[in-house]
Image: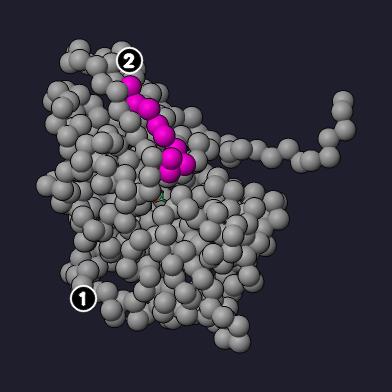
Amino acid sequence: ATLSLGIAQAQTPDLSDPPAIEGDTVADHGSHTIRMGIGLAESSPQYLSSQYFADILDQRTDGRIAVNIFPNSQLGDDVQMMEMLQTGTLDMTYPSTSPATTYVEELAVFDLPFLLPTREAAVAVMQSDVAQSMLDAFDDTGIKALAFSENGYRQLSNSARPVASPEDVAGLDVSGLTIRTMENPVHLSIWETLGANPTPMAFGELFSAMEQGVVDGQENPWSTILTSNFHEVQDYGSETRHVYTPFILMMSERTWDGLAPEYQALVQEAARQSAEYEIQLATEYDDWSREQLEERGMQITRLDDEQIAAFQEAVQPVYDEWAPRIGEDLIAEIQAIVEETAND
Ligand code: KDG
């Protein structure tokens, strides 16, 4: 045996295998190559489930539909890739709901802080008729929205100091943290309200912005912080769980219209199956990623109920500002679904 000083670090947690691909091969309706651009890395649940989506289509069309996945924002960020879907220069992408609010405003309900307290509630909302109608609302945007899945609970990380309270974000005696946000006005409002200096920025530019000190921090699920190696440039993490962000798997309307109806039905089915698998992978990744980050030297602050309540109270003005614009009825509908899951 050789002397090994480093601790072997697993690349992924113990992941469930993808469900067996069932169903007959569909008839030959011609061959298609589909290019899919995603923001996250090869080890992410987003990539692994996209690979499963590709496998389903490959197997059920005898290789006639090939899906090529381009990870790490190499084709562009969420905003750019959605625009490429509209013009037909890209076939598929997998953005967060937050930058997609420019197409379907109602999606901003997911940006409200502390709205979805449990994953069970989040999944129930994503599977609801309200959520389906948000997917349908893409219909004349040039984008075919196929399925919701999980980006996840967002957690704060930064390179300046441990954060356990809104005061730590605002920095009272020192300056407020400069926090990169997604390109979304509710997120801007959250971080402004907390006394930070929010800076909207494309995900692909984030690592170097943190490395160069352009921003102090960012917020994303533990799995993204880990699989994008943010811990290399971020010493502190805080388990704030302030927003649950879904992903939407989407296709260019032009690509969709070019598919035979039987292929369309298959794509829709594969999207649902892979989205379900993605949620499972994201769940398996979540706590494991936090532990991995700690092992790799990130100092992570867990917040107790009282500390979370302090954040919740501090961001109340975000609701006052945004609830009337997003729609009180829509928010009430979502809250009713959340309550149902709490009573089960
Ligand atoms: O493909 C998705 C990513 O590009 C992005 O949505 C990840 O949550 C994200 C962020 O912070 O931009």
Residue assigned mark 2: 63
Disc 1 or 2, which lies upstream in sequence? 2
Residue at position x 31%, y 76% from top? 319
Residue 265 is situated, as x and y percent measured from the top left of the image, at 19, 28
Helix, strand, or loop for circle 1?
helix
- Please state the horizontal and vertical placement of residue 342, each as a whole percent of the image: 36, 62
Q: Are marks 1 and 2 in contact (CB under 8 Å)?
A: no
Q: Identify the residue at horizontal 58%, vertical 38% (top origin).
A: 12
- Count residues near mark 2 (Cα–Cα under 10 Å), then give few for <14, some for 14-19, many for 20+: some
Q: Kindly identify which numbered label has been placed on residue 324.
A: 1
Asked if one can make out residue 247 in the rendered structure from this viewpoint, the answer is no
The residue lying toward the viewer, choosing from 231 and 82, is 82
Tell me, for residue 341, which label it has, or none: none
The residue at 79%/40% (across/down) is: 6
Q: Secondary structure at mark 2?
A: loop
Quarter residue 24 falls in: top left
Q: Which residues are magenta?
A: 66-74
Q: How is the image coloured?
A: one colour
Amino acid type indicated by mark 1 = Pro
Residue 235 vs residue 216: left or right?
Answer: right
Taking the spot 38% from the left edge, 23% from the top edge, the residue there is 55
Q: Position of residue 255 (x, y in %)?
A: 20, 31
> Quick one: quadrant of the N terminus?
top right
Q: Crowding at label 1, few (<14), some or many (≥20) Cα neighbours within 10 Å?
A: few
On the image, the x and y values in percent for residue 82 come to 28, 46
Task: Name the amino acid, label 2.
Answer: Gly
Res. 186 image quadrant: bottom left
Could you tell me how far apart the alpha carbons at marks 1 and 2 are, in whole angstroms?
A: 49 Å
Q: In which quadrant is the C terminus drawn? A: bottom left
